[in-house]
Image: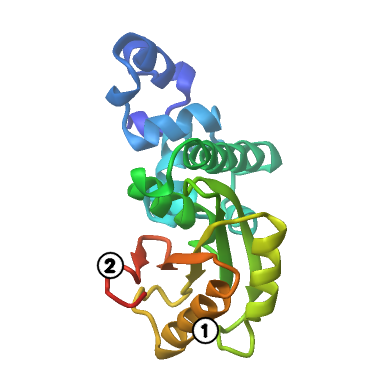
């Protein structure tokens, strides 16, 4: 019944904002946190009910964070303002993780690396090949999308990756690409491509530290699998 009410109709101690200020953010459910962003629902559908619908549609907060703008338009009640706020939260998450990876060696925080790659690549409907360029202390210089489409030796050009690494004065790289199918198992083509790039970059003294296969729910390390 509470989910059908507007925020103003809820008892004061059940309102998400008041609850957060009194007890802290950890006291709120996922739907209550999202309701704070959405602020209002629709006629006959309170903001908590709308928040629950959004979470169910996208598979919880993790799924929502990996959702692209076009998908948000399918939800009745998510107008341009609400879409913009949700996308802003997503971008804040990306930038916050990027700053964390720029401030210290990448693999001091391996979980942050995985989360960052999932936020960047996990929701893409097509395959994207990206490179994390690192300095001599293995801090992030930049993450750049280099190619789109099915990954093969002929669709990803080692020469372009080498040139970009030199242009950024990178000392090492971490490769990453997504699998829209949802599988994190590297293909034989992924393995061949990794070795091709590793050989090409070694000629200019740039190390390949890892290659991640990314989905919305996971980022799998090929180095941990012994494939680098």
Kindly tell me whether residue 205 is visible in this rendering: yes
Tags 2 and 1 in contact by the CB under 8 Å rule? no
Identify the residue at horizontal 48%, vertical 17% (top origin). Answer: 8
Identify the residue at horizontal 34%, vertical 66% (top origin). Answer: 220
Q: Who is closer to the viewer here, 11 or 225?
A: 225
Instruction: Check the picture and name the quadrant holding the C terminus.
Output: bottom left
Q: Taking 54 as reference, is 15 above or below it?
A: above
Instruction: Check the picture and name the quadrant holding the N terminus.
Output: top left
Q: Who is closer to the viewer here, 154 or 71?
A: 154
Q: Who is closer to the viewer here, 224 or 181?
A: 224
The earlier-in-sequence mark between 2 and 1 is 1
The percent position of residue 11, horizontal first and vertical second, equals: 35, 14
The percent position of residue 87, horizontal first and vertical second, equals: 60, 43
Q: Who is closer to the viewer here, 89 or 47?
A: 89
Identify the residue at horizontal 40%, vertical 86% (top origin). Answer: 187
Calculate the distance from the C-alpha at mark 2 to the C-alpha at mark 1. Answer: 19 Å
**Is 68 placed left or right of 174 in the picture?**
right
The percent position of residue 173, horizontal first and vertical second, equals: 52, 61
Mark 2 Cα shell of 10 Å, populated few (<14), some (14-19), many (≥20) = few
For residue 44, the mark is none
Kindly state the secondary structure of the residue where label 2 is placed. Answer: loop
Mark 1 Cα shell of 10 Å, populated few (<14), some (14-19), many (≥20) = some
Kindly state the secondary structure of the residue where label 1 is placed. Answer: helix
For residue 196, the mark is 1
For residue 224, the mark is 2
Depth check, mark 2 against mark 1: the one in front is 1
**Is 228 placed left or right of 92 in the picture?**
left
Q: Taking 164 as reference, is 199 above or below it?
A: below
Identify the residue at horizontal 54%, vertical 33% (top origin). Answer: 38
Quadrant of the rendered image containing residue 90: top right
């Amino acid at each position: 019944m509470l989910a059908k009410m507007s925020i103003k109709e809820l008892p004061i101690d059940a309102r998400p904002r008041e609850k957060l200020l009194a007890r802290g953010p950890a006291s709120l459910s996922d739907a209550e946190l999202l309701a704070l962003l959405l602020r209002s629902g629709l006629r006959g559908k309170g903001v908590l009910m709308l928040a629950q619908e959004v979470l169910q549609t996208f598979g919880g907060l993790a799924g929502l964070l990996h959702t692209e703008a076009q998908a948000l338009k399918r939800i009745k009640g998510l107008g341009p303002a609400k879409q913009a706020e949700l996308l802003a939260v997503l971008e804040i998450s990306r930038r916050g993780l990027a700053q964390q990876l720029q401030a210290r060696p990448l693999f001091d925080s391996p979980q942050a690396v995985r989360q960052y790659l999932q936020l960047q690549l996990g929701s893409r409907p097509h395959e994207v090949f990206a490179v994390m360029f690192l300095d001599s202390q293995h801090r992030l210089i930049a993450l750049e999308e280099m190619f789109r489409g099915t990954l093969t030796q002929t669709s990803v050009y080692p020469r372009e990756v080498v040139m970009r690494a030199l242009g950024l004065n990178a000392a090492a790289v971490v490769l990453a690409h997504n699998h829209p199918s949802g599988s994190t198992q590297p293909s034989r083509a992924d393995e061949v491509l990794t070795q091709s790039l590793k050989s090409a970059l070694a000629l200019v003294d740039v190390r390949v530290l890892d290659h991640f296969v990314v989905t919305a729910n996971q980022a799998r390390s090929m180095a941990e699998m012994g494939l680098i």
